[in-house]
Amino acid sequence: MTMAIAAAISTAVAVWLWITPDPATARLIRLTSHEHPVRWRALRSRLTRPNPVRGADAWSRATIELCQALCAELTAGRTPGEALTRAVAAVDFPDPEALRPLVAAARDGGDVPAALTAVAPAYGGDGLRRLAACWEVSVTAGAGLAALVERVGTTLRASQAHRQDVAAQLAGPRATARMLAVLPALGLLMAGALGMRPLAFLLGSLPGPACLILGMALDACGLWWTNRMALRAQSH
């Protein structure tokens, strides 16, 4: 019973250490949060890696809204440049500052297809690049821009529905992987409850630390590999 309590305490301490920052990071937060908030935000933005799948999904949703707004403005009889300017202003993009060259090109009669291609991000910018191709076809061949934009929006909505379906199908494997990652800790609790003294072996014998480090490394590699496969599946 004592070993079970010790194993439970060790597991709780490990989880607490995992979700809380180390003392150096906590001290850095205290020093920079009040004195240098701007520098701390810049440091935090550099240290935190954005999720490409979430960023791509946000840009895809914004592009779908842009196509809908642009089609409505064109149907109302506005010129393409004015319609694009009003549509961009009506949509909440993940990075509105990056679209300033596009707004300037649409307002001043510049090269809108080139501006659309330039502002399109690496992840989630496929819709903007398709919109640039539609704009180019409309200018060179005289095709109806509203019909082309509506077709692009329909294609993007179908792609978004497919990605959401893939994400829903991957929710089960991800949950299973997290559950399997927690099983070693539960195994320690069960072994301690049965009086097998697993911590004495892991911390008090020569092969124990090697087994502990190897098991934790394999556990972390399994979580990383599962997450990597899920991200690759969602990005296609």
Image (cartoon, rainbow, N blue to C red):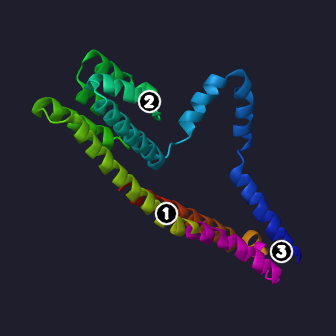
Give above or below for 224 relative to 43.
below
- At label 1, the amino acid type is Ala
Q: Position of residue 52 (x, y in %)?
A: 45, 46
Q: Position of residue 129 (x, y in %)?
A: 27, 38
- Choose top left, top right, bottom left or bottom right for residue 211: bottom right
Disc 1 target residue:
168
Within 10 Å of disc 3 (Cα), the crowding (few <14, some 14-19, many 20+) is many
Residue under the image location 44 percent in, 47 percent down: 57
Q: Outermost residue, right direction?
A: 2
Q: CA distance from mark 3 to mark 1?
A: 37 Å
Mark 2 vs mark 1: give the one in front: 2
| Residue 206 shows in the view | no
Give above or below for 236 relative to 41.
below
Image-based side of 231 in relation to 107, left or right? right
Mark 3 vs mark 1: give the one in front: 1
Disc 3 target residue:
4
